[in-house]
Amino acid sequence: MAAHTLEELSKQLQKIDFCMLQTKNEPGVFSVRPMSNNGDVDYGGDSYFFSYDQTRKVSDIEQDARVGLTFTAPPSLLGKPGIFLAIDGTASLIRDKAQFEAHWVKDLERWFPEGIDTAGIVLIKVSATEIQYWDGEENGRIPLAKREAC
């Protein structure tokens, strides 16, 4: 079978709202928490997540920008297993309201009631450096060129 392309995997990611974001804190302990990407995944391998600035995940990223994301899609109605994706990436923190606006969806008001004007909001951009996938029939790895966080 042919390997999945980055474009195919990106389309899969757009269908999966929640993932697990893994960061590492100073003593080297991993922390993992669920995050919603709101389907905001572009074909270059970038994922975007809103957060409050004063959180452990943000302080972890400030210390070490290397992060991991894991996504899982449920099985299909025909019994084919869902896809599992593991992404290694570099996180950057964006505090620009124009960028907030570009990635905002109305559903985020559940967590950020003042919209992009919510005090202490930050946008986390994860730029993938490698994507691994398993779908029950195929598995593979897509290395992406070393990318610098913006």
Image (cartoon, rainbow, N blue to C red):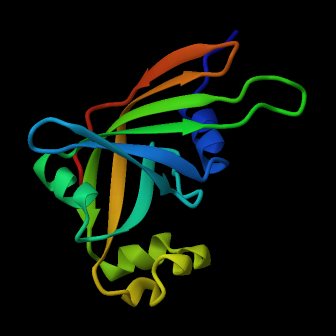
Q: Quadrant of residue 146?
A: top left
Check the picture and name the quadrant holding the N terminus. Answer: top right
Q: Residue at x 64, y 13 (%)?
A: 138
Left or right of residue 73, residue 22 in this image = left
Instruction: Give the image location of residue 120, x and y in percent.
Output: 28, 80
Q: Quadrant of residue 23?
A: top left
* Figure check: 17 above or below 44: below
Left or right of residue 36, residue 88 in this image = left
Instruction: Give the image location of residue 54, x and y in percent.
Output: 22, 71
Check the picture and name the quadrant holding the C terminus. Answer: bottom left
Q: Residue at x 47, y 86 (%)?
A: 115
Left or right of residue 142, residue 10 in this image = right
Q: Residue furthest right?
A: 78
Instruction: Give the image location of residue 131, x and y in percent.
Output: 45, 29
Q: Residue at x 46, y 19 (%)?
A: 141
Q: Nearer the viewer, residue 55 or 16?
A: 55
